[in-house]
Amino acid sequence: MKIFTILLFGLFILTNPNFSQSKEIKRLNGSKIKTNEIDRIITQLMDTANVQGLSIGILNDNKIEFIKSYGYKNKKENELLDTSTVLYAASFSKPVFAFLTLKLVQENVLDLDTPLYKYLDKPIPEYDDYSQLGTDEQWKLITARMCLSHTTGLPNTRWINVKTGEIDTTGQMKIYFKPGTRYAYSGEGLKLLQLVVEKITGKNIEELAIEKIFKPFGMNRSGYIWHDRFDNNYAIGHLENDVLNPKKKRTVPVASGSLVTTITDFSRFVENVMQGKDLNKKLWKMMISPQIKITSKYQFPTITDETTTDNESINLSYGLGWGLLKCKYGRAFFKEGHDDAWRNYNINFIDKGISIIIMTNSANGELIFKELLEKVIGDTCTPWKWERYLPYNCSPK
């Protein structure tokens, strides 16, 4: 019995990516990196840039190959992060909602190109959040496709001045350009689509996500609202100077940014998306096909006339819920997540079957993204300048 137990434990270690320190991960250029080298790279970067907590997931051949957490979920209390710790997903919320929307399209509940107002029982400006649009009938042009590809002309959030980036307590809602004609990242566009989805289904997006994504994909510690079961293991955000920045436990789901999840759960989501699960081939291909070319110099501020040709070499564009690029390693789709004390990034190289998911509960997280991506999977394609991922060892202009 003792020998059997030893053999069983040995088998567990060999087959579990979190225990096998000698395991090798395939990189984009075909080389391999050992997991203990990944540990060394990440811990060194975290120490250098004061990143308090970080979780990472890596896919090889479209399957989860490595998941691990480093640092603290609460540095003040010396509580360590683990792969079941609930983290604030920020704008990782958006591709999950986009996938949910495409499932509704597949079920013929919604059409991507039907103007959204046609699904509602009253004109869009008669809803409180959109009353300021009453004098601009361009709202009649907005479709689900435009919301998912960030071409509605709506601001990212009504509470931020689109030019200065400062807080705007007046909450201005405005369509800044003809819908469908250009890219400008917009959380407000996703909120409008959420309104329509909830009206036509009679369910809120938390109920729909549980039914169509969380349960089927085994995402048991994820939600667009807070659930009591998350209280036993969740992370606190950390500002640059280690000051704690707790996130509000939401009771109302918001498609553009209320998702909480774990590195394990979100890696499962990415794995299913990479494998084309639950979407027919036509919709899956549409999701990762360019809907609009991106020429803006930076992703933020969103409403700007400042353009660049710097990203033409990677064919930077937007699909349905995801940013897109094409480089020497083939096609890729990606998404960021950003809030005061939370920094997340995910990029998926379709033609290589390689993905990386990074989630941090640290305002300093983005300072190490460029170097981490390059050293761990060999990603030199991510448009870090456009995303303003200024490395810790670079001086801002």
Image: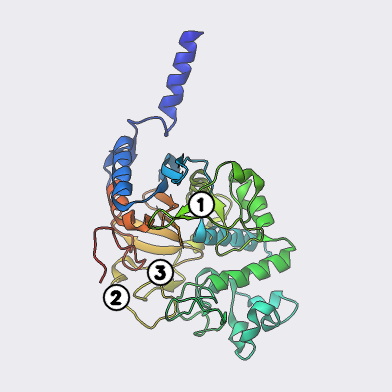
Q: Residue 2: x percent and y percent?
A: 48, 9
What secondary structure is marked by label 1? helix
Taking 357 as reference, is 317 above or below it? Answer: below
Residue type of the residue flagged with mark 1: Val
What secondary structure is marked by label 3? strand
Residue type of the residue flagged with mark 3: Ser
Task: Report how far apart the C-alphas of labels 3 and 1 lie in the structure.
Answer: 19 Å
Q: Residue 372: x percent and y percent?
A: 31, 50
Q: Name the residue under label 2.
A: 309
Camera-side residue of 194 and 75: 75
Contact (CB < 8 A) between labels 3 and 1?
Answer: no
In the image, is 376 to the left or to the right of 94?
A: left
Name the quarter where the C terminus is drawn.
bottom left
Q: Residues within 10 Å of mark 3 (few under 14, many from 20)?
A: many
Residue sitting at 59 percent across and 49 percent down? Answer: 222
Q: Name the residue under label 1.
A: 273
Camera-side residue of 365 and 112: 365
